[in-house]
Image (cartoon, rainbow, N blue to C red):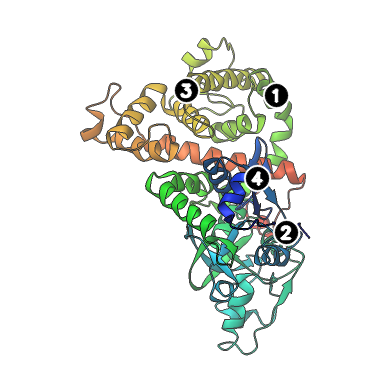
């Protein structure tokens, strides 16, 4: 249990937060909320809470309870200022909690393993094991649905998070679970044998939760905060940063990628690591670029003459001092130095990760076309330093109305957008695999031909 938050006479909660210099926020460990990434704390809820704390001029203290039930009890009892944990607004929760403005919409989905038949409704789950997080909105949904499906049964798990239940479905330890659409979108790239059978109920609103009391000062500050980041586009950009690259899940392509991680990557991993260390890069990002370029095939060649693992042009290879593009180490070294140069050329006031995504776009389409797209972005009233805005402008470089006004002219601007989004997905999968140190192959792999 956490220490309660003392309240001085006539001091509002907002005044107390500012005076103490600390904002206490309850959250969960998950890809959709808060986790420790390669570069430190990450996750949408962390980003939002950190931004709010910075606006208040105080330190952010994150508290991660052992269970979801503990989290709800702690915020209900006032042992933290806010619960920022991907919480759905429900009627039952509104009786005991106060919610801030909605910042994201999700849909609850029944998740199953593609090695088994897809259930058509909740009634079809009666012969399998359906498990959900205890005291979650998913548990409440099943209670509501029981009148329609009298034989509906499930187990409420008080020890595991939704992500862990998805893992159990993937490993065929349980048959079904319910997950929010954003959770499935992030995890499906790693647990590639999972599918949404169908949506359940109406769209749900996610929001921060506050203790229900007569003091509305901190809640009011949060309302103004969300109004501000909605108006200036920062909320949209944060959501894009978290989910923008998950929209086009390619099952077969991801299967092959997972196989190539085992069959091809081991012979080149040291080369990626060494080249990345020399150029101050993340080797997994460099490997993701290599996979997007050639599928880690050192003999790859395109109709336009680019060759090797990093698919260097003859001019780029000469610029990087590479004599033989087909030698894996030479190609990887050249690609690392070329990408590092592109990254260094991106202006310093562009923050990460936007700087990396723009450097990748420049690696693919050229720095001149990227700059043209940034100029168009600004002309459209958007932020040229944000990837979410620039990626909307890049495809316009293929339209005469726009490219005739640019310095560098026509470009197939949709290609760098797809290029960057693919690399983001490959990068996430590589980090997940290396974090887990275990690649669980679904049985459905057997339906595909073997690949070297």
Q: Position of residue 68 (x, y in %)?
A: 70, 64
Q: Which quadrant does the N terminus fall into?
A: bottom right
What residue is at 61 percent from the left and 76 percent from the top?
Answer: 140
Q: Are marks 2 and 3 in contact (CB under 8 Å)?
A: no
Asked if marks 3 and 1 touch (Cβ < 8 Å), the reply is no
- Whole-angstrom CA distance, mark 2 to mark 4, is 14 Å
Check disc 2 and report the residue beneath it: 4
- Residue at image location 63% in from the left, 58% down from the top: 9
Residue 300 at x, y percent in the picture? 56, 29
Q: CA distance from mark 4 to mark 1?
A: 50 Å
- Tell me the mark number nearer the camera, choosing from 4 and 3: 4
Q: Label 2: few (<14), some or many (≥20) within 10 Å?
A: few
Residue placed under numbered mark 4 in the picture: 20
Of the numbered discs 2 and 3, the one sitting upstream in the chain is 2
**215 w.r.t. 437: above or below:** below
Q: Are marks 4 and 1 in contact (CB under 8 Å)?
A: no
Mark-to-mark CA distance, 4 and 3: 39 Å
Mark closest to the chain's N terminus, 4 or 1 = 4
Q: Is residue 452 visible?
A: no
Q: In the image, residue 209 lies at what x, y percent?
A: 57, 62
Q: Secondary structure at mark 2?
A: loop
Between the residue at mark 2 and the residue at mark 3, the CA separation in whole angstroms equals 47 Å
Q: Nearer the viewer, residue 210 or 242?
A: 210
Q: Earlier in the sequence, mark 2 or mark 4?
A: 2
For label 1, the SS is helix
Could you tell me if residue 391 is visible in this image? yes
Q: Which residue is mark 1?
A: 271
Q: Give the labeled residue for mark 3.
A: 346
The answer to whether 277 is drawn above or below residue 166 in the figure is above
In front: mark 4 or mark 1?
A: 4
């Amino acid at each position: 249990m956490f220490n309660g938050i003392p309240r001085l006479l006539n001091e509002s909660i907002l005044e107390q937060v500012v005076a103490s210099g600390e904002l206490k926020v309850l959250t969960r460990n998950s890809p959709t909320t808060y986790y420790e990434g390669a570069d430190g704390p990450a996750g949408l809820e962390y980003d939002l809470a950190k931004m709010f704390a910075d606006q208040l001029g105080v330190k952010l203290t994150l508290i991660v309870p052992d269970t979801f039930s503990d989290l709800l009890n702690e915020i209900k009892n006032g042992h933290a200022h806010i619960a920022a944990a991907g919480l759905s607004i429900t009627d039952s929760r509104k009786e005991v909690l106060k919610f801030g403005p909605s910042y994201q919409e999700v849909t609850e989905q029944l998740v199953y393993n593609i090695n088994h038949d897809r259930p058509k409704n909740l009634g079809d789950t009666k012969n399998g094991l359906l498990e959900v997080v205890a005291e979650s909105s998913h548990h409440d949904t099943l209670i509501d649905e029981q009148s329609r499906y009298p034989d509906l049964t499930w187990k409420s798990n008080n020890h595991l998070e939704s992500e862990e239940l998805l893992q159990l479905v993937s490993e065929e330890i349980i048959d079904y679970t319910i997950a929010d659409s954003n959770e499935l979108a992030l995890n499906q790239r790693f647990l590639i044998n999972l599918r949404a059978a169908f949506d359940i109920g109406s769209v749900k609103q996610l929001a921060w939760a506050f203790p229900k009391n007569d003091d509305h000062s901190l809640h009011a500050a949060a309302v103004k905060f969300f109004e501000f980041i909605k108006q200036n586009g920062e909320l949209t950009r944060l959501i894009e940063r978290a989910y923008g690259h998950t929209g086009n899940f390619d099952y077969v392509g991801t299967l092959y990628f997972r196989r190539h991680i085992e069959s091809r990557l081991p012979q080149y991993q040291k080369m990626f690591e060494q080249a990345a260390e020399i150029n101050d890069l993340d080797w997994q990002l460099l490997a993701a670029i290599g996979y997007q370029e050639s599928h880690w095939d050192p003999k790859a060649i395109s109709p336009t003459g680019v060759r090797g693992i990093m698919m260097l042009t003859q001019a780029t290879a000469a610029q990087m001092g590479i004599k033989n593009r087909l030698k894996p180490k030479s190609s990887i070294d050249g690609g690392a130095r070329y990408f590092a140069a592109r990254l260094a050329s991106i202006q310093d006031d562009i923050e990460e990760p936007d700087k990396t995504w723009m450097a990748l776009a420049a690696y693919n389409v050229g720095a001149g076309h990227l700059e043209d797209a940034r100029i168009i972005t600004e002309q459209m009233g958007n932020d040229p330093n944000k990837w979410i805005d620039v990626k909307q402008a890049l495809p316009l470089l293929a339209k005469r109305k726009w490219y005739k006004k640019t310095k560098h002219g026509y470009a197939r601007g949709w290609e760098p957008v797809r290029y960057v989004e693919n690399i983001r997905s490959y990068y996430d999968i590589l980090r997940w695999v290396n974090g887990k140190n275990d690649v669980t192959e679904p049985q459905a792999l057997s339906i595909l031909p073997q690949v070297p």
